[in-house]
Amino acid sequence: MRTYRQVVDAHLQSDVSMPRVVDEGEYRADVDGLRAVAVLSVILFHLDKQLLPGGFVGVDIFFVISGFLITRNIVVGIHRCRFSLVEFYRRRIKRIAPAMLVVVAVTTLFAQLLLVPEDAREALKSAVASVLSLANVFFWLHTDTSYFAANTAELPLLHLWSLGVEEQFYMIWPVLLLVFYRRGRTVVFMLGLVVAGVISLAIADALYADHPAFVYYMLPTRAGELMAGALVALLVVERFGQFVPNVLFGWLAALGTLLLIASLTLLNSESRFPGWLAAAPAIGAGLLIFAGHYQSTIPSRILCWRPLVLIGLISYSAYLWHWPLLAFYRYAYQDVTLLAGSLIFVTTLSLAAITYRWVELPARRSTSGASRIIVQQYLLPGGAIVGAALITIYPAKFGIATMYSPAYLKKLEEVRATSRPAYLDDSVCQRQQVVTADTRNEHCVLGDSAAGFPKAVLWGDSNAAHYVGMLDQIARRAGFRFRNIEIGSCPPVVGDPKPYISSVRRLECESSLDIVRPVVGRFPVIIVSASWTSYQERSAEFLTSFLSEVRALADSGKLVIILGKVLPVRGYDPRCREKALRFPWLLCANPVVDPAAYVLDINEKLRRFAEQTANVRYFDANAYLCPRGRCAALGPDGVPRYYDESHLTMAASSRLGVEILAREGVPQPFRLVAGWPDTSN
């Protein structure tokens, strides 16, 4: 049996000055170098997006490499009449399953030890999906994209979506090749690959606006990159390179390099990707693989550099390990510092080398038959992970007790009680999608119960909902009732909200506004608040359009009260105190920051508009939240004021109302709601 060093050296012994035609099945050191580029790009991007803005295309480079290698091996096997589906899946399990299952097992163990119960359960659910090759489907269907959703950067197995795509490709592609590929009709088949790739990119681009999660996670919209690799494999196997003049290979490699560099540096997380833009890294990687097969070009010699090839050999394990390490760190400490990032990078490569030596290589060297490989390397360890996950996720169904102690659960509930967000309160009608029943919910009518029919409605998004506690206190003192109804991440506008919101929210926002607008129109007083700055950032026309609508409402005789946006406290982790109950060495700070200038600016514009417009008033509570010009997440008593960086807790909102009444009585705008005399002049 060969040693680890002998195996690696065998991989690295291919001559850098490659022959004019490399055998179609021969080891390619430059491809391992390209793997290194892919995995390093992904890791650097995940460490800090600023390091390599388009580093996420490393995943697409991996897809091209997979499409190339899998198609090449299958087609060569077909040519030699030696291809077997059973042997193919045997080899795939040996290549993929052992390292993946080790990482999944270790990650889920640490998830149970470090994460709060809800987050740990979600990690276990994603682990089950990953073992079943459905990670991408799980995250497509279950990743919460709402405003208050957990940060996806904290999901420890999120990165396995790409493995799900590849595994589903492995299930489908060999069968399609066996059915449709014929050596005498290779050109027709390759044209079919081009058409399939173009269709995949077109579907991704067409669905991007309305179904971004599907586009990001699913095989049909990622197949273009895999087809690019498959096309290169057929060009190589069928020796189409013999029709290409030697001088062109260097230019093809140079073009491929430029496409990859452009993709890695010019694309960023805001780019419309995947879609047509995914063609650039796919074509770039394909050109490098194609040209490198036939000639030793400058890019191929660079890719054959020994350190790059070494990283390429451990790239699969490096990809598996890097994300859980980053996710656990971000879960506790948020931003990755230079020191932390450097340690995570070194740890990733170290774990990858260990996994490659002690897991990947022994699994690949196994000469056992298909049935034994499937059972020993996949079914038994995978079944153990799934079984352990299920009895942990659903303890009551299996008659076992939860692993969390009563003392821990009690302390967790106490911590959560002090930072409960408004949207979880029964008296707050904030919804991601409003239905008619929400507009009639009597629990969402607050204020003075003796005042009769509610005169006012609080309308807006989550930035309106967190004022419910404050307004309830004021309304009780002033003697009026109000209804509240809020739509998450959706502006309180009469016109089209599309320019101001993300595509993910468009359909729910529009349908909710259709229900809410007629209800709002029935009230003589409209109290309105929203994340003004967020909508203004999306469209510079928002404020002008919104104020025009407010003026129209005021001209129709309605009293409109605009509430200013609460000043944010950047750097505040609302769940830090929960996490600190289990996460070692986690200290929760109380961020104290200067008032955000961009919020002060837009609040001032709203105030001036109200002063200059009849039937419009403005109210701002920031003087109470940020006394002496400093904003703190926690009050003087150490109790949280903020649920997150820019939303008050329900309890803090009520305390705010009490404090306002104690210091100034009922503010003038709300006196008008109750019919008190206007003394503002």
Image: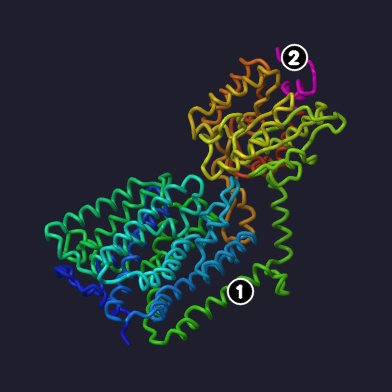
- Is residue 170 a member of the stretch shown in magenta? no
The amino acid type of the residue labelled 1 equals Ala
Against 231, residue 591 (above or below) is above
Residue that badge 2 annotates: 679
In the figure, residue 317 lies in which quadrant? bottom left
Q: In the depicted view, which residue is nearer to us: 309 or 81?
A: 81
Most distant residue in the top direction: 681
**Magenta range:** 662-681
Q: Is residue 572 visible?
A: yes
Q: Which residue is mark 1?
A: 388
Can you say which quadrant of the picture contains the C terminus? top right
Q: Residue 669 colored magenta?
A: yes
Q: Position of residue 476 (x, y in %)?
A: 81, 31
Q: How many marks?
A: 2
In the rendered image, is residue 307 in sight? no
Position of the N terminus, as image quadrant, is bottom left
Q: Is residue 302 left or right of residue 201?
A: left
Instruction: List x then y, in percent, for residue 642.
Output: 64, 42
Q: Position of residue 633 (x, y in %)?
A: 62, 41
Q: Which residue appears at 73% of the width and 31% of the height?
A: 457
